[in-house]
Amino acid sequence: MTKEELLERYAAGERNFAGVDLQEADLRYADLSDANLSGANLQGAYLGWVKLSDANLSGANLSSAEMGYANLSGANLSNANLTGTTLWYANLWHADLSGINLSEVTVDSEDLPDVNLRRVKMTVEELVGRYAAGERDFAGAELRFASLGHADLSGADLSGADLRNTNLSYANLSGANLRFANLLGTDLSDANLSDANLYRVDLGNADLSNADLSNADLNGANLSYANLSNATLVDSRLSSANLFYADVTGAALIRTRLNGARLIGVNLSLARVNTARGLR
């Protein structure tokens, strides 16, 4: 298939291009979001600035491809061949990189902390046992739907971990590193997240009622539709955070930094606000 044919069929609504041969094709700036390119041959292709968000590239041959500034957020790259691939400043936010050998990949992106290269599934028992033995690095762990209520994970490195819909109510996560983690729909009610690193974490629809988030770094975090009722956010940092329709009833927003935060649908009159920065 030629590049022109691919783009024409994509524009017409087709999304299934599994196994297509596009070796050394120049697809820079193309929009192929949601496309199925599983098993495709893209060896040596120029994919700079290409949009491949939520695309299926599982098992694809991307060896020696140029993917600088590519948007691969949410893409499935499991078992893809990335030998010699350049990913300078690529966006791999929430991408599936399981089964990939990245030893020969050139990467430099603030959206790609090392954690995203080490997706590891583990049981709750394994996590708790290793933590009790003194281990603290669980970066990239996958623990979706796990029950970790009342668990002590203070100071643990869970950056980039997949904790969607996990029960972490009453958990102690003080000082934990949850940078770039996915906590969508997670129950963190009454949890201790004081001094935690929650930079750009996804807490959409999460239950943070009565949680202690004092002095936490929530810059750039997604808190849309989150329940923050009666949460403590004293001295926390929420610059550029997304708080669309979050419930802040009774929340302590004292000395909270809200510069550039998106507050559509948020009723701050219901919160306990005292010199919240960025609201003057």
Image: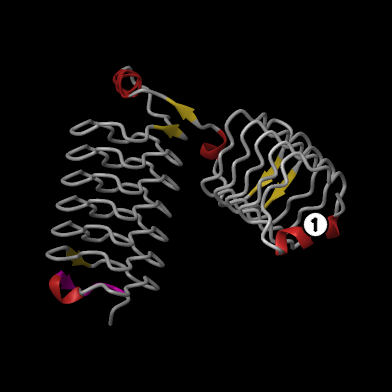
Q: Is residue 116 above or below residue 248?
A: above
Q: Is residue 4 above or below residue 260?
A: above
Assign the C terminus to one quadrant of the image. Answer: bottom left
Say whether residue 42 is left or right of residue 240: right
**Residue with the mark numbered 1:** 27
Image coordinates of residue 245 in percent, x first then y, are 28, 68
The residue lying at 65 percent from left, 37 percent from top is 58
Q: For residue 275: magenta?
A: yes
The residue lying at 18 percent from left, 33 percent from top is 150
Depth order, front residue of 109/24: 24
The residue lying at 35 percent from left, 46 percent from top is 183
Q: Amino acid at mark 1?
A: Leu
Which region is colored magenta? 271-277
Depth order, front residue of 212/48: 48
Image coordinates of residue 136 in percent, x first then y, are 38, 28
The tally of labels here is 1
The residue lying at 76 percent from left, 39 percent from top is 19
Say whether residue 142 is left or right of residue 110: left
Depth order, front residue of 12/100: 12
Q: For residue 121: magenta?
A: no
Q: Is residue 77 above or below residue 52?
A: above
